[in-house]
Amino acid sequence: MEENCFLCHPGKVTQCFRGAMYTAGRECDDCHGNLLAMGGEFSYQDGHTREPWAEEPKCGSCHSGIGQEPVATIAYNPADPAAEPLPPKTHRFAENPNTLYRNSLDNHAQLGCESCHGSPHAIWPNRNPDANDNVTAMQLQGHKGTITECNTCHEPGSFPKGTLNGPHGMHPVNDPDWNDEDGHGHFAEKDNSQCNNCHGDDHLGTRLSKTPVDRVLKDKQGKILATLKAGDQVACNLCHSLQKSFSD
Ligand code: HEC
Ligand code: HEC
Ligand code: HEC
Ligand code: HEC
Ligand code: HEC
Ligand code: HEC
Ligand code: HEC
């Protein structure tokens, strides 16, 4: 990056690129393509040339929304000199069609993507624990990273019967109502394949069922069901058998 894009774009000192994808070792051209692609030397598949400022990389090209698959590390087909963004495999983590990330709104409440993730080159969390980027999430939900605590915006107990209509089709987290059989159990009994993209086809957990923080999960009576460490992937056999989680 120092040898090319950073010759002109602020980076070495100002660190304009510093978020989760920086931590994941991504570089400018993994998302944008190289200088010839950026300069519009090659056309996209339908014959038009990339429009500067309007056609930019997409989260959905790498984040397929399928937890069993690793996140892609290049946002286009490496054999394509124009570096045209790949279409999203599923819409779970995609921007709105033909819309920049910064102008896209989420399905659950028409909130800007940035309200839970931050700006495109500084997607939360920043790996430097003292970074200003982490302060917003720390103040709002008590830990850094994506805003995942529903109680940041909703009153505790807002979903007595559970829901899968949170951001990206998420259910309530750290919520005794959801831990109950009338909560998640009811949803799983109706159609447990709704859980698979995040908890895995085998229900043993994927990176999309990872908790960002240590938790003590309780039921409605306050009984402790399980404890989680930050980074644990929640499997369906954490509190009961897999046989139960696949029952319908
Ligand atoms: C020689 C200097 C220079 C280098 C090297 C350079 N840029 Fe730029 N870049 C610019 C300038 C100047 C603009 C503003 C152009 C304008 O005002 O429209 C720009 C604009 C952009 C834009 C916004 C406009 C658009 O095309 O969408 C993007 C994205 C971008 N650069 C990415 C990159 C990437 C990625 C690299 C490395 C592969 C890179 N640039 C290397 C000078 C440079
Ligand atoms: C993880 C993917 C990713 C990486 C890596 C990345 N960018 Fe971007 N970049 C984006 C996205 C996405 C946008 C469009 C933001 C939007 O849609 O609101 C963008 C937009 C831009 C723009 C246009 C300005 C703007 O605000 O829209 C410039 C300039 C730019 N990037 C330069 C760079 C440079 C230089 C690097 C390397 C230091 C880099 N990018 C690395 C994803 C990336
Ligand atoms: C070039 C591919 C690529 C693009 C484009 C991309 N990401 Fe990522 N992203 C990654 C990789 C790789 C990781 C690390 C995954 C891992 O640790 O398994 C990651 C990690 C993340 C994480 C951290 C997840 C965690 O578990 O802590 C978030 C949040 C995230 N990306 C959001 C975004 C958003 C929002 C956009 C669009 C602005 C975006 N990504 C664009 C490749 C990409
Ligand atoms: C209300 C908060 C909220 C809003 C708004 C939001 N997200 Fe997310 N986002 C989340 C949560 C929570 C996760 C973690 C989901 C998981 O781990 O299963 C996430 C995860 C992601 C990831 C990373 C997935 C991965 O593979 O790790 C991407 C990419 C992403 N969101 C993109 C977007 C885009 C694009 C928008 C706007 C269209 C958006 N988000 C709006 C809360 C939000
Ligand atoms: C950044 C703030 C924010 C976060 C975080 C957030 N929401 Fe929301 N949510 C909203 C807003 C705003 C609305 C729209 C309320 C309205 O239209 O009156 C909404 C609406 C909803 C609705 C539809 C209306 C309702 O109350 O039944 C559901 C369901 C929902 N959210 C679930 C969730 C879940 C589950 C989570 C956590 C995974 C979550 N939300 C996280 C802001 C948020
Ligand atoms: C969009 C991704 C996603 C989907 C879909 C999803 N989960 Fe989860 N689930 C998660 C994440 C992320 C966690 C970890 C939340 C945390 O503790 O921070 C989790 C945790 C849980 C927990 C433990 C409670 C907790 O707060 O950790 C239960 C129970 C659960 N899921 C059941 C289900 C069931 C049943 C389904 C299907 C009906 C389902 N989930 C669908 C992402 C998902
Ligand atoms: C935090 C603990 C916990 C986790 C994690 C968990 N469950 Fe449960 N589940 C319970 C409790 C408690 C009950 C009710 C008591 C019982 O039946 O064991 C239950 C009951 C169920 C039932 C039976 C519902 C009924 O009405 O009989 C199903 C189906 C189910 N869970 C599916 C799942 C699936 C699928 C997952 C993973 C996506 C999952 N559970 C993860 C705690 C959990």
Image (spheres, rainbow, N blue to C red):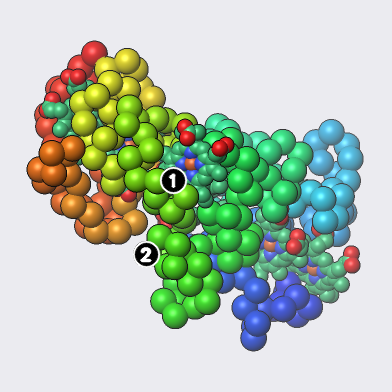
| Left or right relative to 20: residue 228 | left
| Left or right relative to 239: residue 173 | right
Which residue is painted at 44% across and 72% down in the image? 127
Instruction: Name the disc covering residue 142, or none.
Output: 2
Which residue is painted at 18% across and 52% down in the image? 216
Instruction: Name the disc covering residue 154, or none.
Output: 1
Is the residue indicated by label 1 positioned so its CB lies within 8 Å of ligand 5? yes
SS class, disc 1: loop
Residue 201 appears anywhere in the view: no
Classify 10 Å Cα crowding around label 2: few (below 14), some (14-19), many (20 and above).
Answer: some
The amino acid type of the residue labelled 1 equals: His
Vertical comparison of 186 with 81: above or below: above
Residue 224 appears anywhere in the view: yes
Specify which label sits upstream in the sequence, 2 or 1: 2
Q: Position of residue 43 (x, y in %)?
A: 85, 44
Classify 10 Å Cα crowding around label 1: few (below 14), some (14-19), many (20 and above).
Answer: few
Vertical comparison of 197 with 121: above or below: above
The quarter of the displayed image where residue 191 is located: top left
| Left or right relative to 57: residue 61 | left
Vertical comparison of 64 with 243: above or below: below
Which residue is painted at 63% across and 61% down in the image? 119
